[in-house]
Amino acid sequence: LLNVLARCRHHPCIAEIGEEFSNDFWAFIGREDACLSEEAANASKNNNKVVKDTDNDGLVGIEYTQALRFPDDNRLKEVGRLLRSSRPSVVKVPRAVEVSDHDYERLKQERLLTLCQRTLALSVGRGMYSLGTLRPVPAEQLPMPELCLSGRVPPANNSIALDTTNTHADMTVWPEFHNGVAAGLRLPPKSTKGSSAFSVSRSWIIYNRATTSDETTNADTDKETDFSHGGLLMALGLRGHLSALSMTDVYEYLTQGSVTTSVGVLLGMAANRRGSCDPSVSKMLCLHIPSLLPPSFSSIDVAAPAHAAAVAGIGLLYQGSSHRLMTE
């Protein structure tokens, strides 16, 4: 009997009884987690309960699912709390009696700057944590989480904003890029077989591009969205969806976008055509590598990040091909 119960516990499908399993059955074989999942699913179906992700980072859905499967294990919830970048950080700074108000504000800004630097790096881990957990709606834009650069000071939880006068002007450029990569990695990989078939259309990619209307949007918001969209393009290439763009679309991105957009397109197209030696993608990458251009070409000013991305893209495009020119 113990052997049968153990087999049913690990493989419940072998205990086909012609009807849905009851809660008593799950409890009898030691699978209370399945019992709780069934109850939660029924409650969600009856009450039309929807898990709302107000942070747009995909962590709420993961936490909700793991709470059903592992109700007594909070490790995934703790990981989600550590990787959440859309909420203000808690700024705890002890204050000595002899510290003046001005010095205390300076200490809080120094502490907040350290916390914001950590916040700007969270998107790399969040991309791995939420990989392939989202199936987007074609008529909606991809949810993009915010990188919050503010904090709250206990015990009154007063808000404090980061003073950016002494920081680099491009402090958030590449973190926004990686934030877009993390958001794009939530998409499932491209597939054309079976019930899990999924692909992204060109219109959806263009729909997620940054808007440029001066009347309806702020210039700073447009720049942040443009940086994030560059990261999204790279993620689409990593997941195999960037082939939906034509070369004219790629040319428009390279000529009208920022340096982050160029890096995202170069790496994304190379990753999408990895190991294929595609001639059109190869020409695009070689145009950003001056050493691979013919002597008759005039000198081209290529940004250092785009140059490095093109070199890395050449390695991806010619992976395993033993191409002599590229190898040398």
Image: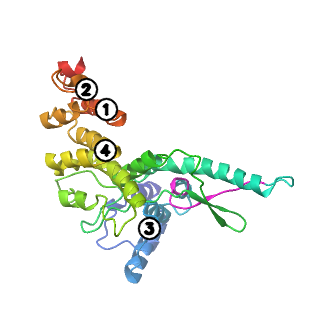
Q: Identify the mark at residue 128; answer none if there is no mark.
A: none
* Kind of residue at badge 2: Pro
- For the residue pair 272 and 211, the one nearer the viewer reads as 211
Q: Is residue 100 left or right of residue 69?
A: right
Question: Whole-Å distance between the Cαs marked 3 and 1?
Answer: 38 Å
**Closer to the N terminus: mark 4 or mark 1?**
4
Residue with the mark numbered 4: 264
Callout 4 amino acid: Gly
Relative vertical location of residue 53 with respect to residue 96 in this rendering, above or below: below
Do residues under tags 2 and 3 come within 8 Å of each other at their CB atoms?
A: no
Q: Are marks 2 and 1 in contact (CB under 8 Å)?
A: yes
User: Mark 2 = which residue?
Assistant: 290
Closer to the eye: label 4 or 3: 4
Q: Earlier in the sequence, mark 2 or mark 1?
A: 2
Q: Say what secondary structure mark 3 lies in.
A: loop
Per the rendered image, the range of residues in magenta is 80-94
302 w.r.t. 99: above or below: above
Q: What distance separates the C-alpha of mark 4 from that of mark 1?
A: 12 Å
Q: Residue at x 17, y 51 (%)?
A: 244
Foreground label between 4 and 2: 2
Q: Mark 1 is on which residue type?
A: His
Left or right side of 167 for 210: left
